[in-house]
């Protein structure tokens, strides 16, 4: 993690998973701090992240998702606080890893809300939550972190490049060629 904030979880068996706790700086975290969620219940004597409900629902509904990162990286937060859509058609890697990164309203990640749960899919692995954070999913934790890193690098490039001029995105024909080559 690049800050003390953020929640990371990893599925370990069926819909059981491990998740980070609140109020522990990520750089100080120890193995004993991690909270196990088994059969929908937290490990005795430990307190999991307040976003546990969201992680649990994502795992239940998305068998292809085995790890989740919910965090606040600086350049992605620029898109979060402005509610601007991030166009990831910058370089092939960005589009292949992310395809589309929608924005959802603040509060969409609260218990009982369906917006994020209905949007996440293999083709929509990351979502920007306005005025809050970015949620990134993947098959393995390292791959999920790679996806987050590509998203942050793309957001940084777009933010810094705006002073140079307008984005010239990869065109529809190039996107289709990427889809056929890497995603089918």
Image (cartoon, rainbow, N blue to C red):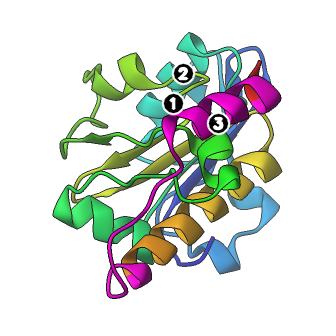
As helix, strand or loop, the secondary structure at mark 2 comes to loop
Where is residue 181 shown, x and y percent of the image? 81, 29
Instruction: Please tell me how crowded label 1 is: few (under 14), some (14-19), or many (20+) other residues with Cα within 10 Å.
Output: some
- Image-based side of 162 in relation to 154, left or right: left
Counting from the top left corner in percent of width and height, residue 163 is at 32, 87
Q: Residue 60: which quarter of the image?
A: top right
Residue 100 picture location, percent across and down? 46, 38
In the picture, measured across the screen, residue 51 lies left or right of residue 12, that is left
Query: Where residue 117 sits in the image (x, y, percent)?
Result: 40, 21
Q: Evaluate whether residue 61 shows in this view.
A: yes
Q: Residue 124 — which label?
A: 1
Packing grade of label 2 (10 A; few <14, some 14-19, many >=20) is some
Q: Are marks 3 and 2 in contact (CB under 8 Å)?
A: no
Determine which residue is flagged by label 2: 121
Mark 3 or mark 2: whose residue is earlier in sequence: 3
Q: Residue at x 68, y 51 (%)?
A: 92
Q: Specify the label residue 43 is tagged with.
A: 3
Give the quadrant of the N terminus: bottom right
When the figure is inspected, residue 31 is found, relative to residue 43, above or below; the finding is below
Q: How far separated are the C-alphas under marks 3 and 1? A: 31 Å
Looking at the image, is 98 positioned above or below residue 84?
A: above
Measured along the vertical axis of the image, is residue 55 above or below residue 29? Answer: above
Query: Does label 3 or label 1 sit earlier along the sequence?
Result: 3
Q: Residue at x 55, y 38 (%)?
A: 99
Question: Can you tell which of label 3 and label 1 is closer to the viewer?
Answer: 1
Position of the C terminus, as image quadrant, is: top right
Q: Of 13 and 75, which appears nearest the observer?
A: 75
Range of residues picked out in magenta: 160-182
Q: Nearer the viewer, residue 173 or 146?
A: 173
How far apart are the alpha carbons under marks 3 and 2? Answer: 29 Å
Are the residues tagged 3 and 1 within 8 Å (C-beta)? Answer: no
């Amino acid at each position: 993690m690049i800050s003390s904030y953020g929640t990371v979880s990893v599925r370990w068996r069926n819909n059981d998973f491990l998740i980070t706790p609140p109020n522990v700086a990520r750089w100080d975290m120890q193995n004993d701090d991690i909270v196990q969620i088994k059969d929908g219940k937290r490990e005795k004597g430990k307190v999991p992240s307040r976003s546990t409900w969201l992680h649990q629902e994502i795992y239940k509904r998305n068998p292809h998702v085995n790890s989740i990162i919910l965090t606040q990286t600086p350049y992605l937060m620029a898109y979060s606080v402005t509610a601007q859509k991030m166009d990831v058609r910058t370089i092939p890697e960005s589009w292949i890893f992310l395809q589309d990164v929608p924005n959802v309203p603040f509060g969409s990640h609260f218990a009982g809300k369906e917006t994020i749960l209905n949007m996440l899919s293999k083709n929509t692995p990351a979502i920007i939550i306005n005025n809050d954070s970015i949620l990134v999913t993947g098959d393995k934790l390292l791959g999920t972190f790679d996806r987050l890193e590509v998203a942050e690098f793309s957001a940084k490039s777009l933010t810094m490049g705006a002073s140079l001029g307008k984005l010239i995105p990869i065109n529809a024909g190039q996107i289709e060629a990427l889809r056929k080559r890497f995603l089918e």
